[in-house]
Image (cartoon, rainbow, N blue to C red):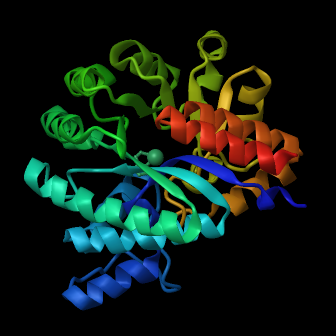
Amino acid sequence: MSVTDLPKVELHLHIEGAAPPAFIRGLAQEKGVNLTGVFDEQGNYAFTDFWHFLKVYEAATEVLKTPEDFGRLTRAVLEESAANGVIYTEAFLSPDFCGGGDLGAWKEYLHAIEEAARAAEAADGIILKGIVTPVRHFGPEKAKKSALCAAETAGSFITGLGMGGDEKAGKPGDFAYAFDMAREAGLRLTCHAGEWGGPESVRQALDDLRVERIGHGVRAIEDPALVERLAEDGIVLEVCPGSNVALGLYKTWQDHPVERLREAGVKVTVSTDDPPFFHTTMNHEYDRLADTFGWDEGSFAEINLTAARAAFCDEETRAALIKRLEAAND
Ligand code: ADE
Ligand code: ZN
């Protein structure tokens, strides 16, 4: 048995960022959208750094116009995830890309996404939950609109709020209103921090937004007191090593701090972020982590249990998930 045969739980996946290039090209052709600058000569997404990546990401997202487009995308993404042994995934869904922050439109997009998720669960047994995602560089006012969409559709499918986007735009505290609204609606909270911002950005997300998980969070390693706090408080990091290496945050897999964080007692999980952009899959992440750090089946089983325990889902789903993971470890 190889580590890639294990059932997997993924907590950090952007739905648009998971769109295969061929899928985006197909839609562009159908709709007559010009995607000059999005792909390289081999047909892969082309970007030079994180900020260019965000621009290319948003340009590619331009072709996703209707609820039906997002339904088709969800189906394609979940098929790929299931092929990688993922049994449960949480996807970042942004009202900014799904109806421009309008609640009525958002509900239509959500309907199409949920229908696709139901079809995927019936076909492959994979479960999807949605985390509403304000985009940080779109600003606090748009974040409030996203949070309102989240609060109004909170339930068994929309279970969390988690901000992404450019960490250098504003401070976490600028978005406290949006996170407070989501918390009051019973949503669970996460936020990208400690990717392009340093340890201080992780502290601010914890203190000012009161999140229970951190997207990435890896730059906490630069501050031992923060590492200790994360371990003591049981804060879960949604670590995406392949994304960090592809975007140049770390030069090599060997340089990535995920093993040092784990050794320090921090709860780490493994996800892909935007897999086709970074030429990765869950299987690829597992292979590279096993090669680089010697992680074995037991290490990955523990990581998947950590992810299942930290998943933004109802307790019935969690119990079923843990049962499936434990059955595979017997
Ligand atoms: N949106 C999509 N991928 C992202 C990342 N790695 N960081 C911040 N925002 C994102
Ligand atoms: Zn992300």
Residue placed most toward the observer, 302 or 288: 302
The vertical placement of 326 against 226, above or below, is below
The number of numbered discs placed on residues in the rendered structure image is: 0
| Side of 29 where 22 appears, left or right | right
Residue placed most toward the observer, 126 or 202: 126
Residue pictured at 41% horizontal, 63% vertical: 118
- In which quadrant of the rendered view does residue 80 lie? bottom right
- In which quadrant of the rendered view does residue 186 lie? top left
| Side of 10 where 159 appears, left or right | left
Viewport quadrant of the N terminus: bottom right
Q: Percent from the top left, x then y, of residue 286?
A: 75, 54
Residue pictured at 25% horizontal, 90% vertical: 30
Q: Is residue 6 visible?
A: yes
The vertical placement of 1 against 51, above or below, is below
The vertical placement of 243 against 156, above or below, is below
Q: Percent from the top left, x then y, of residue 203?
A: 46, 16
Q: Is residue 256 visible?
A: no
Q: Percent from the top left, x then y, of residue 167?
A: 37, 36
Residue pictured at 71% horizontal, 27% vertical: 261
Residue pictured at 88% horizontal, 46% vertical: 330
| Side of 218 where 148 appears, left or right | left
Q: Percent from the top left, x then y, of residue 27?
A: 30, 83
